[in-house]
Image (tube, rainbow, N blue to C red):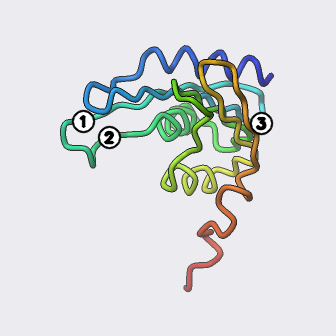
């Protein structure tokens, strides 16, 4: 399943819209039913409106009705595998993603748990009523 996730993330990488940073990223997330949803980064001239590939993939899954997500793969054309940003990590925590696969186009791969990448995620049960 990891190879399938990485293939989907690479395909999404090629669809990225990154005319400003020229840093394309693709992601693919797998849910508990083994369905894969892909996403790419989409930039905007107003940088704050840019959406990362990881969040695009997660939001695509959620929009399709999936809520129990398990693993995400992230691919970029970089010298080493690139880790998701903090905002993406928090969104991953919201939907229960446990495994993160990071890769580059050269085939280098790094694995991490979300707990390793975001050890003290903000959780719904931390809110005061």
Q: Which residue is mark 1?
A: 44
**Residue 122 falls in image quadrant:** bottom right
Of callouts 1 and 3, the N-terminal one: 3
Mark 1 crowdedness (10 Å alpha carbons): few <14, some 14-19, many ≥20: few
Which numbered disc covers residue 32?
A: 3
Mark 2 crowdedness (10 Å alpha carbons): few <14, some 14-19, many ≥20: some
- At horizontal 70% and vertical 51% (from top left) the residue drawn is 96
In the rendered structure, the answer to whether residue 72 lies left or right of residue 91 reads: right
Q: Where residue 99 appears, x then y in whole percent?
A: 75, 43
Q: Secondary structure at mark 3?
A: loop
Q: Which residue is mark 2?
A: 50
Q: Where residue 39 appears, x then y in whole percent?
A: 50, 27
Task: State the CA–CA distance, disc 1 to disc 3.
Answer: 32 Å
State yes or no: discs 2 and 1 in contact (Cβ < 8 Å): yes
**Residue 71 falls in image quadrant:** top right
Mark 3 crowdedness (10 Å alpha carbons): few <14, some 14-19, many ≥20: few
Marks 2 and 3: which is nearer the front? 2
- At horizontal 38% and vertical 40% (from top left) the residue drawn is 51
State yes or no: discs 1 and 3 in contact (Cβ < 8 Å): no
Task: State the CA–CA distance, disc 2 to disc 3.
Answer: 28 Å
Marks 1 and 3: which is nearer the front? 1
In the rendered structure, the answer to whether residue 65 lies left or right of residue 50 reads: right
């Amino acid at each position: 399943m990891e190879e399938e996730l990485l293939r989907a993330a690479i395909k999404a990488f090629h669809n990225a819209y990154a005319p400003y940073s020229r840093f394309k990223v693709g992601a693919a997330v797998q849910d508990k039913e083994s369905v894969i949803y892909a996403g790419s980064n989409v930039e905007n001239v107003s940088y704050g409106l840019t959406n990362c590939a990881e969040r695009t993939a997660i939001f695509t899954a959620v929009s399709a009705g999936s809520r129990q997500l398990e693993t995400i793969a992230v691919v970029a054309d970089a010298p080493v595998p690139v880790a998701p940003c903090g905002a993406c990590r928090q969104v991953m925590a919201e939907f229960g993603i446990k495994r993160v696969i990071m890769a580059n186009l050269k085939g280098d791969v790094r694995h991490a748990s979300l707990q390793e990448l975001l050890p003290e995620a903000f959780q719904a049960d931390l809110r005061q009523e």
